[in-house]
Image (cartoon, coloured by chain):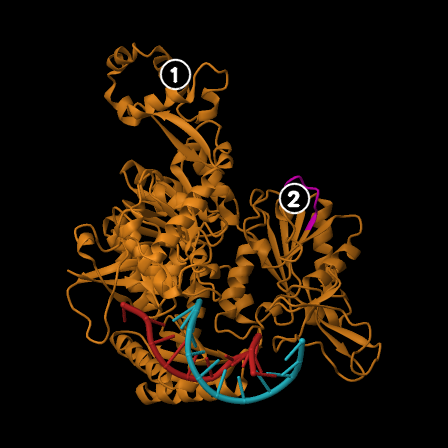
Chain colours: A orange, B cyan, C red
Amino acid sequence: MPYAQIVLPLNLKGSFTYKVPEELTPVIQPGMRVLVPFGGKKIYTGIVFELHDNEPENFIAKEIISVLDESPILTEEQIQFWNWLSDYYLCGLGEIYRFAFPSSLKLESETYLKLKPNITVDFENLDINEMYLIQALEVRQLINLSDIEAFIPKKEIIRTINSLIDLQYIEIDEKITEKYKAKEVAYVKINESVLDNQNLSEILLKLNKAPKQRDLFLFILDKQTENPDIHIKKSDLFQDGHFGSSHFKSLSDKGLVEEYYMQKDRIEGYEGELEELEELSESQKTAKEEIDEAFEENKNVLLHGVTSSGKTHIYLEKIEECINEGKNILFLLPEISLTKQITQRLEKKYGRQIGFYHQKLTDFERVEVWRRIKQNDIKILIATRNALFLPYRNLGLIIVDEEHDSAYKPREVSPFFNARDAALVLAGFYNAKVILGSATPSVESYYRARKGKMKYVFLNERFGDVKLPEYELINFKEAQESKKVSGNFSLQLIDEIRKTLDDKNQVIVLHNRRGYANVVECESCGYVNYCSNCDVVMTYHKAANEMKCHYCGQRASKPKTCPKCYSENLNERGVGVEQIHEEVSKLFPDHVADRMDVDSMRKKFAYEKLYEKIEDRETDIIVGTQMISKGLDFDHIELVTIPKADSLLYVQDFRAEERAYQLITQVSGRAGRVSGKGKILIQTYNPDHSVFQLIKMNDAAKIYKYFLTERQKFLYPPFTKLVMIELKHRKEDRVNRGSQFLGSVLRKYLPEECVLGPEKAQIARLNNLYQFQILLKLPRGKNYEKFKEMILLSLKEFDEITAYQSIKKDVFVDF
DNA sequence: AGCACGCCGACT
DNA sequence: GTCGGCGTGCTC
């Protein structure tokens, strides 16, 4: 098989064909990383996806420079998974590769070269470039590929390196990886196989000739048996000068002890005792049995458990079972800041078998987790969506917590995929099971479960007989008419808050809109402050005293007079959370009201500080955006209020009502977690709105039935498949015409009623790019695959027009 | 995606 | 006279 299909970390579709040099044919395998030249002077780390012997017809394949792995870094399951993602989400393998791998695992021209140790170079047979490079390496030891450009012509670089690697003079240095190693602390332990064999006396006998080594061995063994959960720092061994590192090295060479590296802060968490699980309540037991049944039938599970029903508890049981079967677990969360509770409970029990993987890790930390996963060193990985790409072995269970959360499919980063749906597919490749958990499942998952494609498990009670909170609707219109209001608060609402505060309990006020005022408008001439990069009005932030664009982040100072007509009558419209916070502070001057939104939480540890403040009950009222719906599990919050609930529904999105329901239900879950006397006050102009009425009834089956009926009526998912194509360009005219053209091509291949648009995007210009959208509403079922091929065909036809090539296209499947 | 090549305007 | 803007084409 002298040819290989290589995926490169570029946003190009498909793979590239390279020739496998003869000496590499015995070692190369799909899933391994290789170094390949690309486009004149660049070198990339690519991945072998396929080996074959079809000589390309239209070009001459370049040769693979070297193979970087001894065994495939991408498992077979991952290769299947990547192919699926690429097919399903219409994205390139290169994009997936880019996203999936930590950058140290895909070094490019930043890759460093070094001389092989102990070599004698025969300069006679080198050409001039090769000599330059060797000489440069003798002086500098490490050189990256870009540096080489300074003294070797670009076109000669690859050939020169190639030839020197062939001659065994130089090699690739993984310097970047090693550079980070210093940040970790070395720990030591007795080799596990030694402990298993139990033939200690034999070992000690052999060590008798080396008393220092024997003592050291015993010292480590002692510490380890004393408390198996403790980690022994390598540096501690040598502290009193009794042992030296050579003693340790000898032991390590004999295979008796080994060292391992960990981040320091990771270990500090779980020095406590092991915690046994509390027993499950009756309803939890039933739920767990239902899950067991489902797994036996090879079905995945949607665990719909109301807030505080103890879903985590059930997860823990399943995790334990899974570990006992020798399988590993992936625990997915929408964002890593939510790990607190689950981590605390798991760490006590599983200690060093837990790993974390998320967007905030440094590159080296990511590589470290890769290594540990590959070595089967992590049993439970707590992670965000980017962890779907790790080289798992033995994966037995994936838990997707808060499965409805939109953080599972962010719109900003390509490739665009929904981690929840991808997890289901990935699990399939590993023959692993999935539990999707949520108090407010997405309509799609609910439907899937109700259709029998997954098992639906409903946990309808809070743990420990705690009652669910009660909902009450306040008619703000009536309150206004009878003059029983103060600002945005009805007197009834104020009264309820006061009562709660008088009882020394805490109150949450939800207002899901950042800033102080949405718009600052000139009363004389109507001027409003637009962002210069986007077609969006800027929001006034009083706390920071500036105007902010919530889309591109641009900031500007707040005008004192109208920049157009110099009038001083600037009017603020649209209520933001800062304003609600201000009102609350004025209404309850004797109580502490804190604000929680992305703007006030930007400072380091701001979140932690506020969290503690709430925990210590130094804060009485927490005013915040949707941020407060997550992770705030406190015992003394008894009242949740939503003064301007209508704003949750005024969003132009077919999921707006679902989102509103989810947000309201999630914040509601913060109330009365212990007392069972939680109360939710929804203040609205439309108390008769179905969504509010249904929330008040607190009947999940009914509200999902309502959502599903609406979706069916207007042909939205889960009854159709949505694909959205977004086109962007700096020139409005260009992208306008381009999208018209693409629209006409799509209409040529797809049924007329399936193609909607193109239309200007809701934000017509973002970051100086004009955006147009085409929405495809496609039927589910067999035809869908055909239609998707038609989409690909249309995009290809579109790409053939050179004038449109500079238009950026993003395709969102399952929009 | 990145990069080279090539063709037009505003500068030492 | 050139520097540098970006439109276009190509990468196994």
Residue A775 vertical position relative to residue A377 in the rendered view, above or below: below
* Disc 2 residue type (three-letter): Lys
Does A527 sit above or below residue A441?
below
Q: In this view, does A58 lie above or below A49?
A: below
Which stretch did the figure color magenta?
A611-621
Output the chain of dot 2: A
**Which of the 4 quarters of the picture holds residue A776?**
bottom left
On screen, residue A497 versus residue A560, left or right, reads: left
Query: Which image quarter: residue A785?
Result: bottom left
Question: For the residue labelled by badge 1, is the local secondary structure a helix, a strand or a loop?
Answer: helix
Q: Mark 1 points at which residue?
A: A216
Residue in view at x 47 percent, y 40 percent: A343
- Residue A181 position by quadrant: top left
Q: What residue type is labelled 1?
A: Leu
| Residue A714: percent from left, percent from top | 42, 79
Q: Quick one: A476 or A299, which is closer to the camera? A: A299
Circle 1 crowding by C-alpha within 10 Å: few under 14, some 14–19, many from 20: some
Magenta stretch holds residue A614: yes
For mark 1, name the chain.
Answer: A
Front label number (2 vs 1): 1
The answer to which of A528 and A575 lies nearer the viewer is A528
Instruction: Name the residue located 25 percent from the left edge and 46 percent from the top edge.
Output: A70
- Is residue A383 rendered magenta in the image? no
Asked which secondary structure carries label 2, the reply is: helix
- Direction from residue A707 to residue A317 in the image, left or right: left
The total number of labels drawn is 2
Q: Name the residue under label 2.
A: A609
Quadrant location of the C terminus of chain A?
bottom left
Q: Point out the residue furthest to the front here.
A: A124
